[in-house]
Image (cartoon, rainbow, N blue to C red):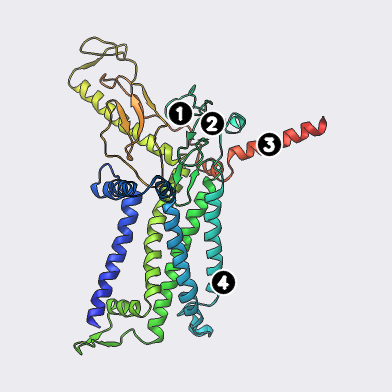
Amino acid sequence: MSKFVVLLSVAVVLYVVFFVGTIYYCLYADPRKDPIAKFVSVTLPAKLYDAFAKSCGSRNLQALNFVAERLLILIYCAVVFGAWSVVFFYIFPWVDSQPESASQSAEYVPHYHKAIGYVTFAACVLSWRYASTTSPGIITKQSLHRYSHYPYDELLFPSGKTCKTRHIPKVARSKFDRYKYLQNVPRFDHFCGWVYNTIGEENYRFFLLFLVVHVVMCVYGTIITSRLFYGEAKRHNLIGATFVDRMTGQEYEATTWILVQFLFHTHLPEAAVLLLMGVMAVALGIFLMYHVYLTSYGMTTNESYKWSAVKKWHKKQTKRYRQALKNGEIVIVPDDSKINNDSEDTSQKSSFTVSDDADVTCTPSADGSKSDQGLVKDDHDCVIGHCADEDIVRDPGPMPRNIYDRGFIENWKEVLFPISLRSERSFEVKRGTKTKNT
């Protein structure tokens, strides 16, 4: 068994490393700073695309673009439905083989977990469907009144701006979606390739439901499958048994690692799903906690990247200002006005504005280019803001406050009961009443 054990151990390690590495470099790593992430998410796809473009015609290239845009959906379907196929054809029969008696069932997996499994599968499919098909809300001239309910903070979202593509006023917290709808989306969060949909004001709750269902599914599946493996070891008295190497005849006491190797050898499909669910439970759990954090503090993913740029700017300006004070380049006079060594008035605070040009997606992208002069770029190497008179040292003042943070309860009410839908219901009632009275 030694040769097989070695091969199995190597396969398991490579399997885990592959999934952990894929999740890290595709979802979390910054391609602008990490060369491996840049190769995986930028260089390799670009080289493959160029090679395909040279060898195939324009029609095949269009087909490639269509598939590439939906690649994450294809991966999602292959992984999820492949894993559930193993559950239906291998794990559910395994549950059926467990003891029926109440005295023994505590050591194994009770049969009612099959029914829970079917419910979990239905919840998985339905949550994905709602997240992928529900509109985030589309801002047009006709629907502008529905989404104009957030004030402008004059920092992330300055007033008086007009969309250059649709020629309509830019609503606070909105952003133009370049990926799917080619329209302005209210309370824009990000574009998610796993559901191939833009996440905004009216479907963010379904995206959170999608994450919650899949985290629960992975955690629950990991626990149940682990319990099945434990029950298998107990039923066959493997704990404390002695194993013999067929090649050498040498005997080994049943350590945990030997038991794992033996059980994985006898239940390889189930073991593969167990590893997959365990890894995904951790990755999706972290991603869910990130969105719970954002919602609790009244932010979107799009806004969190912008606030990151604001914080970097504020920290940099504060450091420069304090250093200038220390070096005597700026003198605070009794009337509290600030002047530099050229007697130039610097009482005005530095002007920092944030652009909405950054594309926020669930997968990083970057071209590796350096930041342009006077531009602040986010972690995905997208231009999100600029500072006027960057070379002038001024007091940045206190850190700006997020005016959209209305408290934990109100922030969650905005997500679970979108304001635009509440406004629409109110509008429909008033319109119906007016029509009736007329």
> Which is nearer the N-term, disc 4 or disc 2?
4
What type is the residue that disc 4 sits on? Answer: Ala
- Horizontally, residue 313 falls left or right of residue 144, namely left
> Which is nearer the N-term, disc 1 or disc 2?
2
* Cα–Cα span, label 3 and label 2: 17 Å
Q: Are marks 3 and 2 in contact (CB under 8 Å)?
A: no
Q: Secondary structure at mark 1?
A: loop
Residue of label 4: 115
Query: How many numbered marks appear?
Result: 4
Residue of label 2: 150
> Which is nearer the N-term, disc 3 or disc 4?
4
Q: Secondary structure at mark 4?
A: helix
Q: Are marks 1 and 2 in contact (CB under 8 Å)?
A: yes
Q: Residue 376, labelled with which disc?
A: none
Q: Quadrant of the N terminus?
A: bottom left
Residue of label 3: 426
Relative to 33, residue 162 above or below: above
What type is the residue that disc 1 sits on? Answer: Phe
* Cα–Cα span, label 4 and label 1: 49 Å
Q: Nearer the viewer, mark 4 or mark 2?
A: 4
Residue of label 1: 157
Can you give x and y, in whole percent of width and height, for residue 390 in the image? 28, 22
318 vs 34, nearest the viewer: 34
* Cα–Cα span, label 3 and label 4: 41 Å
* Cα–Cα span, label 1 and label 2: 10 Å
